[in-house]
């Protein structure tokens, strides 16, 4: 019987466990156990199973139809921007190809967010970016605080863009950063240089220079992307960060 996280109710616990299992590809085909088998496996009632199935269906992971049973959806149907799916992808030790795709999306989002921040951020939001930058300066290299401060820096810029759609991408960006920074920062091995590259973005925003903010952020992410592409070219496939 699976051990379920006590921080969730029964249905939520089952969603977490079963969702991770699906993302990790632990099922041989697209079919899942029957409702009765899931009750037995997770030690929950049929009503809890049905509620969990509804939640996983809403995330695009599975479908449940009469006489067809519960089936896993093709990956192109998954709601990959869902915070749970993002976290499960992170916990499944993603391939470098997934990491590359994360960075490609970041390139499409964050430079423009930095440009918008330079145009529209108020003093309070600029101070939030600066505070995150100072946390980075003071943090020990490759420490948990260093990682959290780096993430806070990028998320603060999304908020500073004053664009509600960019702000809603904070969970995606946070997850992408949590994986990619853990991989690329040790390779670069220059904490002061990383901080100064972030400072260039901040200073451009503070000085209300949208184009410089955009280009500085683009350079920051493009360097990380180059590290990943080099790793792929060298034949690496999976990044184990635990």
Image (tube, grey):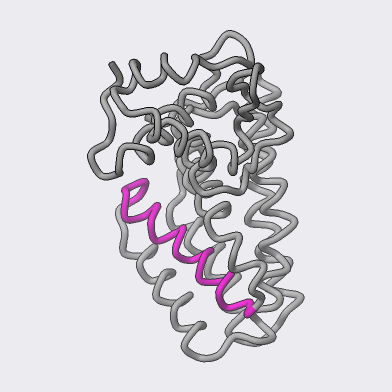
Q: Residue at x 73, y 66 (%)?
A: 215
Q: Is residue 174 left or right of residue 211?
A: left
Q: Residue at x 51, y 91 (%)?
A: 123
Residue 169: x and y, percent? 60, 60
**Above or below — where is 129 with respect to 179?**
below
In what quadrant of the picture does the N terminus appear? top left
Q: Is residue 39 left or right of residue 116?
A: left
**Above or below — where is 91 with respect to 159?**
above
149 magenta-colored:
yes
Which region of the structure is painted magenta?
A: 141-162
103 magenta-colored:
no
**Above or below — where is 3 with respect to 102?**
above
Is any atom of residue 188 visible in this view? no
Residue extending farthest to the front is 66
Q: Residue at x 75, y 56 (%)?
A: 108
Q: Is residue 49 left or right of residue 107?
A: left
Residue 155: x and y, percent? 52, 65
């Amino acid at each position: 019987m699976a051990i379920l996280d006590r921080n969730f109710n029964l249905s939520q616990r089952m969603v977490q466990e079963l969702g991770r299992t699906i993302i990790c590809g632990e099922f041989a085909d697209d079919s899942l156990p029957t409702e009765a088998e899931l009750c037995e496996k997770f030690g929950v009632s049929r009503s809890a199973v049905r509620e969990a199935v509804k939640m996983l269906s809403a995330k695009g992971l599975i479908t449940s139809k009469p006489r067809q049973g519960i089936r896993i959806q093709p990956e192109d149907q998954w709601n990959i921007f869902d915070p749970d799916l993002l976290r499960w992808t992170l916990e499944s030790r993603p391939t470098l190809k997934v990491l590359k795709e994360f960075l490609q999306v970041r390139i499409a989002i964050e430079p423009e967010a930095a440009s918008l921040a330079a145009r529209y951020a108020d003093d309070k939001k600029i101070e939030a970016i600066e505070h995150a930058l100072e946390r980075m300066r003071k943090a020990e290299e490759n420490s948990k605080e260093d990682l959290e401060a780096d993430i806070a820096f990028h998320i603060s810029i999304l908020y500073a863009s004053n664009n509600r759609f960019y702000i809603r991408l904070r969970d995606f960006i946070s997850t992408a950063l949590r994986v990619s920074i853990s991989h690329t920062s040790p390779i670069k091995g220059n904490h002061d240089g990383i901080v100064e590259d972030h400072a260039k973005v901040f200073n451009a925003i503070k000085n209300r220079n949208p184009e410089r903010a955009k280009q500085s952020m683009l350079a920051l992410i493009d360097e990380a992307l180059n590290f990943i592409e080099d790793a792929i070219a060298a034949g690496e496939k999976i990044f184990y960060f635990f």
